[in-house]
Image (cartoon, grey):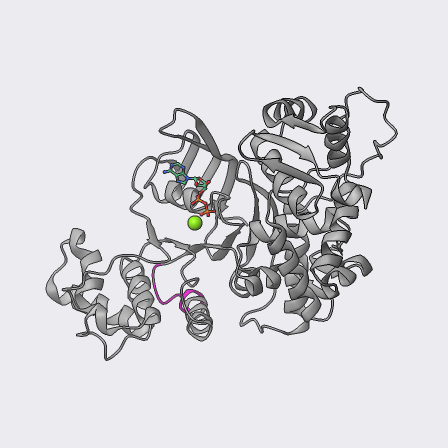
Amino acid sequence: MAENPLLELKQVTKTFLLESGTSIKVLENVDLSLFPGEIVTLLGPSGSGKSTCLRIMGGLMEQTSGEIFSFGSHFKGPNPNVALVFQSFALFPWDTVFENIALALEPLQLTPEEVKNRVKKVIDLVGLEGFEEAYPRELSGGMKQRVGIARALVMDRAVLLLDEPFSALDILTADSLRSEIVDIFQNKQTGTRTILLVTHNIHEAVFMSHRILVMGVNPGHIRGQVINDLPFPRVEGSAPFNQMVERVHSLVTETLMPDVPQTAPLGTAPAGSTPNNSLQVLPNVSVSEVIGLLETIHADGGSGDIFKLGQQIGKDFGYTLFLVKAAEILELVDTPKQKVILTELGKHLVEGDINVQKRMLHELYGDLTLVSEVAQLLRQSPTLRLPVDLVSEKLTEWLPNENPSELLSSLITWGRFAEYFGYNDDTKELYLDVGQETS
Ligand code: ADP
Ligand code: MG
């Protein structure tokens, strides 16, 4: 693109200092440019730093390092060229729709006539005609969000930043608002020259934007970009639309679900040797939620899409990934791209009763390298039990990059269900459950 960016982040990093004194890095080296004429989406799971990035772009929050350029010049502080819309925001209950929108114009000190004209114009644009005198309590969620969008549009600013503006709305309302915003933008009905949309919804990104930036986590960073050159208006469900969704899906999946490293079996390691850190670590998720996930896939005919599955089981995308990963490590599912497919084992487990499930998990869980190492450790104790602190120490030694209390917590919950380990809360000891081994 020949023109200069309207807003630009260069190598922006953000670190929060927590009350406990520790600091967390939320954004790392983010480079991002918004050019005239484009809608860009920032796509990432919750917690990836999208909102933080937007706040920094709007100047509501200061970056820890890196620079911001607005219209080509170095910029700091609240940016007068930027308008923001959040998922939910405050409307003043004692003000009408008209007044709530007009509020945004106050700093401009316009004449009442000018205010009226500008507010009237955006009211028409966002479909609020007839609601000018209504109060917020009389409005549906969709109508309230229209007021929020109108309030941003009325300022006629060049850069519009939208933070998950449709995620609290019902499907139909969200669909029509998406189209309306694209139309308003394409028809140049306001001063908006570029839009950045934050979302975790891939269809929304493909429907609305020219470029999709995919974020990775820990710390948040931009992993890659997909150029979306489908012509407008875009048709959901059409073949080119679906292809674009697939492309974005694969980039997101690649970003968030690296293949589980293949590990060599350690069962043959001589006693007393230290296992390397290719130990398989089961995410610390609940057994029943993993089984619930498998049941959902089974009910859908044995395969599902990871994004839809998250919605079906009511979990956010990041957590769903952990559930899928746990199931994958146990060989209960395969995950080609963003698909999650039950394996024969997985199918068997879902169809079995609780005893079958326990027996199967006992086998599968016991095959994990970390589990067999811990079992080995317990076996070396004459009582087949050890204080958890000691186990925790070993875990830290084997897996220095993992959180030992998470590991332990996972070992206890999964170990109990699979009747592999037991934990005595009074003595704080982990023990080998030999009930099944001997039966
Ligand atoms: P997203 O919008 O992608 O869900 P956010 O930008 O809201 O992500 O948050 C990113 C991370 O930063 C999260 O882990 C969140 O807990 C943390 N975070 C956000 N704001 C603050 C803050 N003011 N203080 C400490 N941590 C914060
Ligand atoms: Mg957010």
Q: 134 or 258: which is nearer to us?
A: 258
- Give the image location of residue 175, x and y in percent: 47, 72
Q: Residue furthest left?
A: 112
Q: Is residue 68 magenta?
A: no
Residue 206 can be seen, yes or no: no
- Quadrant in the picture for residue 73: top left
The residue at 27%/71% (across/down) is 123
Q: Is residue 165 left or right of residue 251?
A: left
Residue shown at 62%/39% (left/top)?
412
In the image, residue 75 lies at what x, y percent? 35, 36
The front one of 403 and 34 is 403
**Along the line of sight, which residue is nearer the eye, 109 or 352?**
352
Quick one: 101 or 351, which is closer to the camera? 351
Farthest right residue in view:
268
Q: Is residue 411 left or right of residue 347?
A: left
Does residue 417 appear left or right of residue 13 in this picture? right
Question: What span is colored magenta in the figure?
Answer: 184-191
214 up-or-down from 295: above or below: above
- Where is residue 419 shown, x and y percent of the image? 70, 45
Residue ID at (53%, 57%): 315
Within the image, what quadrant is residue 120 found in?
Answer: bottom left
Direction from residue 428 to residue 139 in the image, left or right: left
In this view, 148 is above or below 65: below
